[in-house]
C-alpha cells in the first residue's frame, strides 16, 4: 500500500511542479553546513533555495533558534520567507540538511497552496489528519524537488546520550520508494544516486 500511495501522490506533485533535476552538490553542501563560518552556512542554504526555483519574493533567509522543543526539527515561516533551525543542529550537517530540505519544501508547497490543500481536505477533513497528511506530502515534495538525498541523510541521528532518534514523516520503505520513483521518472542511474547519498542515506537505502 505504501508503494501505491507514493506513486499516486508523486504523480500529483509532478503535475504541479514539473520535472526537477537532482541536486548534485550534496558533498559541498554538507561541508558548508558543518562550517563554523556562518556566511558559508548561509551560502549553502541559499544553494538549496535556488535549486528549489522559488521566485525572488520567496528567497528564503534562515536563522538559528535556541528555543526549539526537542522534537521539532525546523520551522518554515511562510509569511516572512524564513526558515528557523535549532541551535542544536549547528555542526551537524546531515541533520541540518534534512531539516532544511523539509522546510524548503513547505515554502514550495505554499506556492501551490490551493491545489494541495483541496486534495488533502477532500481525503482528510479532520484537522489533525489533514495536518499529518500535509507533513507527509511535504516530505514527498522534497524528493520531487530533487532533494531526496538530503532528506534521507539525517532521518536517523545519534543523540548526545548515545540513543538514536528518528525524524521525518515517511517510513523507511516509503523513503526508498520515493527516491526510486523519482530516479525512474528522471531517468537517473544508480551511479547518479550513489554519488549524492551520504553514508547514512546508503545504509537506509539498504535497509540497515
Image (tube, rainbow, N blue to C red):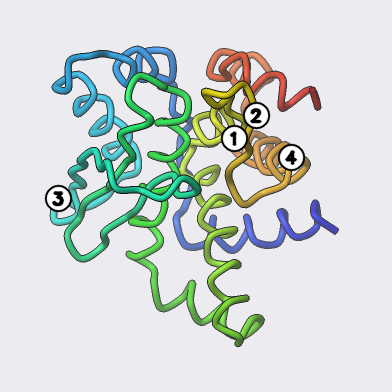
Residue at numbered disc 2? 164
Mark 2 vs mark 3: which is more N-terminal? 3
Name the residue carrying label 4.
172
1 horizontally vs 188: left or right: right
Badge 1 is on which residue?
155
Q: Secondary structure at mark 3?
A: helix
Query: Is 123 drawn above or below residue 12 in the view shown?
Result: below
For the view shown, which residue lies furthest in the front direction?
161
- First of labels 1, 2 by sequence position: 1
- Please indicate whether residue 108 sits to the left or right of residue 160 in the image: left
Mark 1 / mark 4, whichever is N-terminal: 1
| Disc number lying in front (2 or 3) | 2
What is the distance, in whole Å, between disc 3 and disc 1 at their CAs?
Answer: 30 Å
Which image quadrant is residue 201 in? top right
Estimate the x, y position of residue 86 in percent, counting from the top left. 33, 39
Q: CA distance from mark 4 to mark 3?
A: 34 Å
Residue picked out by circle 3: 56
Q: Secondary structure at mark 1?
A: loop
The residue lying at 27 percent from left, 32 percent from top is: 45
- In the image, what residue occupies the spot 55% across and 50% down? 139
**Quadrant in which the N terminus appears:** bottom right
Amino acid at each position: 500500500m505504501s508503494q501505491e500511495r507514493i506513486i499516486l501522490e508523486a504523480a500529483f506533485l509532478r503535475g504541479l511542479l514539473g520535472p526537477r533535476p537532482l541536486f548534485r552538490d550534496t558533498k559541498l553542501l554538507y561541508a558548508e553546513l558543518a562550517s563554523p563560518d556562518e556566511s558559508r552556512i548561509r551560502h549553502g542554504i541559499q544553494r538549496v533555495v535556488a535549486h528549489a526555483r522559488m521566485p525572488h519574493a520567496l528567497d528564503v533567509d534562515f536563522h538559528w533558534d535556541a528555543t526549539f522543543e526537542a522534537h521539532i526539527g525546523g520551522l518554515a515561516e511562510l509569511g516572512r520567507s524564513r526558515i528557523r533551525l535549532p541551535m542544536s543542529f549547528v555542526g551537524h550537517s546531515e541533520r541540518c540538511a534534512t531539516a532544511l530540505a523539509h522546510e524548503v519544501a513547505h515554502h514550495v508547497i505554499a506556492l501551490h497552496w490551493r491545489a494541495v490543500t483541496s486534495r488533502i481536505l477532500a481525503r482528510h477533513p479532520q484537522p489533525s489528519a489533514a495536518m499529518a497528511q500535509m507533513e507527509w506530502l511535504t516530505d514527498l515534495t522534497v524528493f520531487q524537488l530533487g532533494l531526496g538525498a538530503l532528506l534521507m541523510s539525517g532521518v536517523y541521528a545519534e543523540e548526545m546520550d548515545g540513543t538514536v532518534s528518528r525524524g521525518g514523516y515517511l517510513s523507511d520503505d516509503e523513503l526508498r520508494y520515493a527516491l526510486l520513483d523519482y530516479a525512474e521518472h528522471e531517468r537517473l542511474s544508480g551511479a547518479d544516486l550513489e554519488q549524492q547519498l551520504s553514508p547514512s542515506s546508503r545504509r537506509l537505502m539498504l535497509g540497515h
